[in-house]
Amino acid sequence: MNGRFSGLGLSPPSDATVIWVETTDRALHFIDGVFMATDGLANVRREYRVEKGRKFYKLYVSPQGVEDVLALLSRAARYVPIGEIRVEE
């Protein structure tokens, strides 16, 4: 079963920017809903990493959409807990 999906190319496109967002499991559903309404501005993943008890979830963003995504996350923080946001270079 390991090789079953190997042909799907599950790695992100080479031009995608990764943004890590510190948030909660419940807030991630809200954030995902926000980006579902933006016609593909960001791909919210359920993939996360834990650093010192803080959960950071992964978003794939097109390079030209980074500023828009950051603005939407800032607005979403009025309604759900969003902590640190890291843009990978």
Image (cartoon, rainbow, N blue to C red):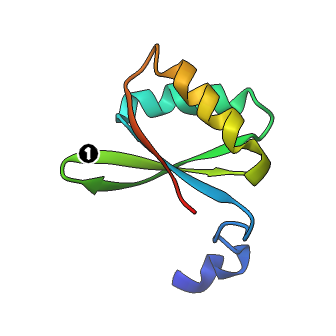
Q: Nearer the viewer, residue 60 or 25?
A: 60
Query: Crowding at label 1, few (<14), some or many (≥20) Cα neighbours within 10 Å?
Result: some
14 to the left or right of 70: right
Residue farthest toward the left in the current orientation of the protein? 52
Q: Residue 41 appears in which quarter of the rendering?
A: top right
71 or 21: which is nearer to us? 71
Where is 59 relative to 49, above or below? above
- On screen, residue 54 versus residue 56, left or right, reads left
Quarter of the figure with the C terminus: bottom right
Q: Secondary structure at mark 1?
A: strand
- Residue labelled with disc 1: 54
Seen in the picture, residue 2 relative to 62 is either above or below; the reply is below
Q: Residue at x 62, y 80 (%)?
A: 4
Query: Which residue in the rendered view is the most extreme toward the top?
Result: 79
**Above or below — where is 11 with respect to 60?**
below
Can you give x and y, in whole percent of width and height, for residue 79 in the image?
46, 14
Q: Amino acid at mark 1?
A: Arg
Residue at 72 percent of width and 80 percent of height: 7
Residue 33 visible in the shown view: no
